[in-house]
């Protein structure tokens, strides 16, 4: 289990897809930020401004990354990278808990 010390948490959450995906922003003293959130089962497409590392802490999903024609299975304890200025698709089969780091 990860624990983040000496951080500030934004009280207002982020909500996407009519509340099916939610997160909270965590700000670190070095200026970096991450979001911690949940995704309910469903299909989603996200866009990125910055490169991202998506760490799946629990649950299962499939991801279709930019430039790929195939879906990759990801489960709790695994991660994937998404390039900046791109879009990626998710098929979430169970409730997913995630941590997104902005690179």
Image (cartoon, rainbow, N blue to C red):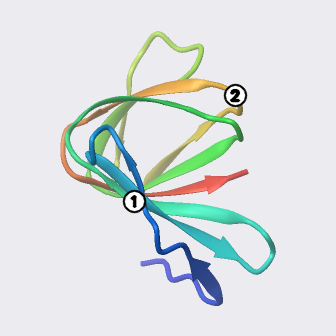
Image position, residue 66 (x, y; %): 57, 20
Residue 35 vertical position relative to residue 26 in the rendered view, above or below: above
Q: Which residue matches tag 1?
A: 37
Q: Residue furthest bottom?
A: 6
Q: Is residue 87 above or below residue 23?
A: above
Q: Would residue 38 be seen by someone viewing this image from the given angle?
A: yes
Query: In terms of image quadrants, where is residue 7?
Result: bottom right
- Left or right: 47 with respect to 83? left
Label 1 or label 2, whichever comes before in sequence order:
1
Q: Position of residue 93 (x, y in %)?
A: 19, 38
Residue 85 bears which disc, if any?
A: 2
In front of the other: 15 or 94: 15
Q: Secondary structure at mark 2?
A: loop
Report how far apart the C-alphas of labels 1 and 2 lie in the structure. Answer: 21 Å
Would you identify the image quadrant in which residue 25 lies? bottom right
Q: Nearer the viewer, residue 76 or 31?
A: 31
10 Å crowding of disc 2: few (<14), some (14-19), many (20+): few
Q: Residue at x 20, y 40 (%)?
A: 41
């Amino acid at each position: 289990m990860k624990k983040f010390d000496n951080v500030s948490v934004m009280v207002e959450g982020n909500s996407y897809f009519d509340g099916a995906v939610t997160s909270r922003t965590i700000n670190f003293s070095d200026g970096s930020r991450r979001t911690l959130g949940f995704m309910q089962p469903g299909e989603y497409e996200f866009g990125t401004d910055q490169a991202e590392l998506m760490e799946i802490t629990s649950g299962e999903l499939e991801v279709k990354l930019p430039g790929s024609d195939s879906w990759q299975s990801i489960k709790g304890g695994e991660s994937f990278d998404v390039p900046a200025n791109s879009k990626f698709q998710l098929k979430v089969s169970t409730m997913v808990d995630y941590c997104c780091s902005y690179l």
